[in-house]
Image (cartoon, rainbow, N blue to C red):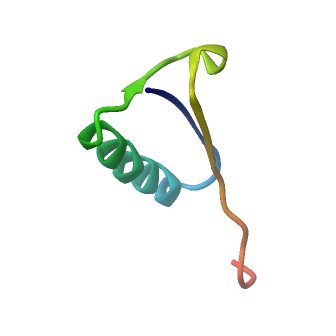
Amino acid sequence: MKYHLVTLGCPKNKVDSDGIEMLLRNAAYQATASPKQADVLIVNTCGFLEAA
């Protein structure tokens, strides 16, 4: 299966996305640059819980 991952937001999100990618690759998923070719689409973003 193929996945497409989009990361938006702060640098913490990049770290989280790296972890997500590692889990997916360990489960034999393959990354694709094309959302149309992906079986799974992931958008990793954030919201503020408190004022920064």
Name the residue rendered at 66%, 15% in the picture: 36
Q: Is residue 51 left or right of residue 41?
A: right
At 30% from the left and 45% from the top, the residue drawn is: 22
Image quadrant assignment for residue 21: top left
Q: Residue furthest bottom?
A: 50
Q: Position of residue 8 (x, y in %)?
A: 64, 45
Q: Is residue 22 above or below residue 13?
A: above
Q: Looking at the image, which is closer to me, 32 or 6?
A: 32
Q: Give the residue drawn at x 36%, y 32%.
A: 29
Q: Is residue 25 left or right of residue 32?
A: left
27 w.r.t. 52: above or below:
above
Numbered disc total:
0
**Along the viewing direction, whichever of 37 and 44 lies nearer the viewer:** 37
**Could you say which is closer to the camera, residue 43 or residue 51?**
43
Residue 6 coordinates in the image, percent (x, y): 60, 36
Q: Please, is residue 17 above or below residue 47 in the view?
A: above
Residue 49 shown left or right of residue 28 in the figure: right
Residue 2: percent from the left, percent from the top?
46, 25
Image quadrant for the N terminus? Answer: top left
Quarter holding the C terminus? bottom right
